[in-house]
Image (cartoon, rainbow, N blue to C red):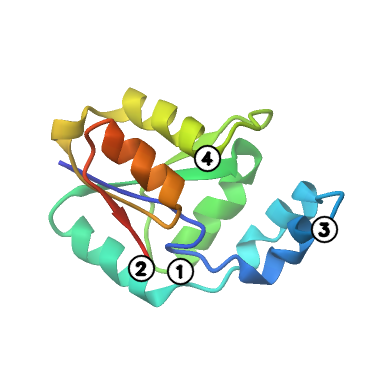
Amino acid sequence: MIAIFDIDGVLADASHRQHHVAARPKDWDAFFAAVGADPVIHAGRDRLLAEAQRHEVVLLSGRPERTRTDTEAWLLAAGMGRPRVLLRDDQDRRPAAVVKSELISTLAPPDQVAVVIDDDDSVVAALAAMGYSAELFR
């Protein structure tokens, strides 16, 4: 079985970089350039480490592929090891619920996924509608 976690808002506190996308025009390059400085969300990391005792952990993020090196270095430094990480294509600007629904369907069917943990209501609703056990992280 697989336990799937979102990164931003579940494992990583991205609040320090929100100002880059709060105004117009949004500066997505600056927003994603700062992923390596995210504080850890300890409750999320603790849940990931607990699930890793029972299941394979996979991270499913709306971050673009160009953040892979920084994301994987951050995970290792934050004590979360080297889980498999699924990221959106760099040019993919679709809503997270659409991207994550597509990515998860290529990963595993619902009966092979123990839980999906995400902080986005729309993602949780979309994945639950597909039959996945999706849980809102707060």
Q: Along the line of sight, which residue is nearer the eye, 124 or 114?
A: 124
Disc 2 marks a residue whose amino acid type is Arg
Q: Amino acid at mark 3?
A: Ala
Of labels 4 and 2, earlier in sequence is 2
Please identify, in this view, whether the residue under mark 1 or under mark 2 is nearer the observer: 2
- Which residue lies under the disc numbered 4? 96
Residue 124 — which label?
none
Q: Which residue shows up at 33% across the image and 38% down it?
A: 127
Task: Determine if residue 59 is in view.
Answer: no
Q: Which residue is mark 2?
A: 45
Q: Which numbered disc, 4 or 2, marks the residue closer to the eye?
A: 4
Pointer 1 with pointer 2, Cβ within 8 A: yes
Decide which of tag 4 and tag 3 comes sooner along the chain.
Answer: 3
User: Percent x, y for residue 105?
Assistant: 33, 25
Query: Residue tagged by mark 3?
Result: 23
x then y, percent, for residue 53: 16, 59
Badge number at residue 78: 1
How far across and how far down the image is residue 12, in percent?
Answer: 50, 65
* Disc 2: CA contacts within 10 A as few (<14), some (14-19) or many (>=20): many
Q: Residues within 10 Å of mark 1 (few under 14, many from 20)?
A: some
The reply, left or right, for residue 59 in relation to residue 74 is left
Q: Nearer the viewer, mark 3 or mark 1?
A: 3
| Residue at the (23%, 38%) spot, across then down | 132
